[in-house]
Image: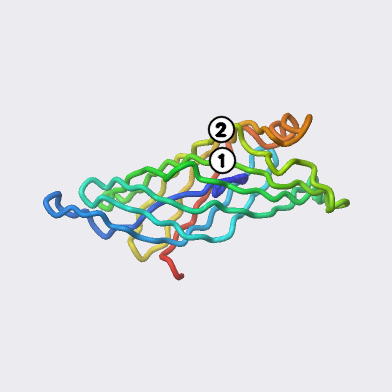
Amino acid sequence: MPTIARSAALTTLPVAFLLAAAPSASAVELTTTQQATTSTRLAKLGSTVSFPATTMTSTIDTDDGSMTSTMPAQTTTTRLALAGLPLADVRLRIVPDGPAVGSMSPTEGWIRTTQRLNVEIESIRPVIAPGINLVKPTCKTTSAGTVALSGDFTGITEPATLTGDLTIPSFSGCGFGRDLLVTAAVSGPGNTVTVDLSPAGT
């Protein structure tokens, strides 16, 4: 989610574990909480942005396996480099645009979910001049990007990994002449979002 990520953020990004599907006559909504760690591989920059672990809350319908999930906005700072030379420290934030919506099948062993998210760049500070912020704090994507995540269901006490690709929209509010520069450097398809999930408290 992301990354610019993660959380997509990316990205970001939701799933829940269920032991087995209940019969429709006794269907209930099950609420679970997982620990989620999001990272995003930025295609244009060739670098991976990792976000701190956070919590994700999911509500699952045990009748049809549909689910909705929520996760807070996530912020991280990453260092960008060119040919191994450090260039700038970038502080970015992924902000979910509403809950993620998806479904899961304990019997078939899969989970699928879709999350919309915005990417905000709070600062870009050159390594040689860290007191200078090259962008305005209003720098963010012009619209929410969408990431479709999927992974294997392995059991309620087992970890799981969801992956998907995020197309990062163009940026605005970055400052005069800088919207195009940030868009050229970051925006576009092929940004891989990975969400590692584990039971809360592990």
Separation of residues labelled 2 and 1 (CA atoms): 7 Å
- Viewer can see residue 10: no
> Could you tell me which residue is drawn at 23 percent across and 57 percent down?
20
Camera-side residue of 150 and 23: 23
Residue for point 54% across, 51% down? 73
Q: Is residue 189 visible?
A: yes
Q: Nearer the viewer, residue 158 or 31?
A: 31
Give the amino acid at mark 2.
Answer: Ser
In front: 194, or 99? 99
Query: Mark 2: few, some, or many residues within 10 Å (few <14, many ≥20)?
Result: some
Residue 132 in picture, x, y percent from top left: 84, 48
Direction from residue 134 to residue 138 in the image, left or right: left
Q: For the residue carrying disc 1, how many other residues have a C-alpha within 10 Å: few (<14), some (14-19), or many (20+)?
A: many
Query: Which image quadrant for residue 43?
Result: top right
Which residue position is annotated with label 2? 143
- Residue assigned mark 1: 118
Q: Amino acid under label 1?
A: Asn
What percent of the width, then of the height, locates residue 52? 58, 60
